[in-house]
Amino acid sequence: MTEPRPSPVTAGTIQTAAASRPSRRRVWSRELALALLTLSIILVFSILFPVSFRSTANFSAILRNLAFEGILAIGMMIMMVGGVFDLSVGAMASLAGVITGWLMKVAGVPVPLAVIGGLAAAAFGGFLNGFIVAKVRVNALITTLGTMGVFQGLALLIGGPGITFLPDSFTRFGQAEHLGLQAPVWFMIGLALAAHYALAHTRFFRQYYYIGSNAKAAHLSGLHVERLQIISFTLMGLIAGLAGIIYSSRIATASSTVGVGAELQAITAVILGGASLTGGKGTIWGAMIGVFFMALMKNVLIISRVSSEWQGIILGAVLVLAVALDSVMNRKKL
C-alpha cells in the first residue's frame, strides 16, 4: 500500500525524479487522515440516525451506489500517478453502455459479442485520447474536455434517452448478489486488488510513478513515456467501458447520461485519497477510501434531508478543498 522505490533497471537520472515524491509517511498520513475522518462521520451519524443510517440495508446501498464511481476511480488513480487525467471517462462509460445495449436490443448481436463491442469502442476512445495527448501533444485537459462532448453526443445519438428491457442473460450478472453485496461491488473489489498489485509490485506499472514525478527525466532514463501514456489512456477507456456496461447490467437499462459528472467525482475521490494533479504519488487503497468517503457524504446529506441544491454546493466545495489541499502540500514539498 506504499509507493514503490525505483528498481535498479530504472535507476540513474530517474532517481532524481523519484526523490521529489513525498515520503511514504506523508502519503500514509493523507490516507489515514481520510480513513479516520470517514470513521468519525460513521460514528456521529450512527448516533444521530440509529435507525435510518446504522443499518445493513443502508451500508449495502452505499456500497452498491459507489461501485460505478469506484471502478472509474481505479483507472483514474493509475492515470494521475502518471501525471495525467481524463475528463471524458463518464461520457465514455455512457457510450460503452448504449453501444452494448444497441447491439443487443436493435442489432440482435449475442450478449458476449455485444459486450466486447462496447468495450472495444471504449478502449478505442481511450486510445484516441492518448494519441492526441502523447503524439499530437495537446493538453490532456483540452483533449479530454473535447472528447467528452463527442462521446456524450454519440451516446445520445445512439441511445436516445436510454435503451430498456435488456436481455435477462445480460442483466443477470449485474443484479446477482453474494454475501449481501451485488456483483458490481465484488467486481470493483477484485479490480482494486489487481490494480493495487500492479502498481505496487510490477515493474511495468511502477514506471508511471517515475513519469508522474518527472516525465523528462523518465524519458532520459530510457522509459517510453509516450507509449506508456497512450497505454494508460487506453486502459482508462477500457475500465470506463467496464463501468458503464456493468452499471447497465445492474439497472437493466443502457442510459446515455449515466456518466454525467462521474469524472469529477472520480478525480475528487483520488485526490482526497492521496493522488496529486502533478502526478507521481497515490495508491489504489487511497482511491477506494476516497470513493467511500464521497459516497458516505452523499448518503448522510440525503438522510439529513439536505436539499439537492445544497448537496451540489457541498460536494463541489469538497472538490475545491481537495485540489487546494493538494496544492498546499505540493508547495510545502518545494
Image: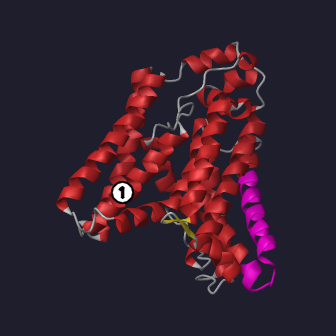
Toward which corner of the image does residue 45 lie, by quadrant? bottom left
Nearest the viewer among 188 and 229 is: 188
- How many badges with numbers are in the image? 1
Left or right: 314 in relation to 277: left
Q: Which residues are magenta?
A: 102-128
Determine which quarter of the picture holds residue 297: bottom left
Residue drawn at (78%, 66%), measured in percent from left and top?
116
Return the x and y of residue 54 as percentages of the image width and height: 28, 62
Residue 181 x/y as whole percent = 50, 64
Using the image, determine if residue 185 lies above or below residue 11: below
- The structure residue drawn at horizontal position 78% and vertical position 38%, both measured from the top left corner, is 227
Q: In the image, is 110 to the left or to the right of 102?
A: right
Please tell me which residue lies in front, 50 or 91.
Answer: 50
What colour scheme governs how the chains and residues are painted in the rendered image of this protein? secondary structure
Residue 231 seen by the camera: yes
Residue visible at 78% across and 71% down in the picture: 112
Packing grade of label 1 (10 A; few <14, some 14-19, many >=20) is: some
Residue 106 in magenta stretch = yes
Instruction: Please state if 205 lies on the left or on the right of 293 as rendered.
Output: right
Q: Give the residue type that dot 1 points to.
A: Leu
- Evaluate whether residue 79 shows in this view: no
Q: Determine which residue is flagged by label 1.
A: 296
Residue 110 magenta-drawn? yes
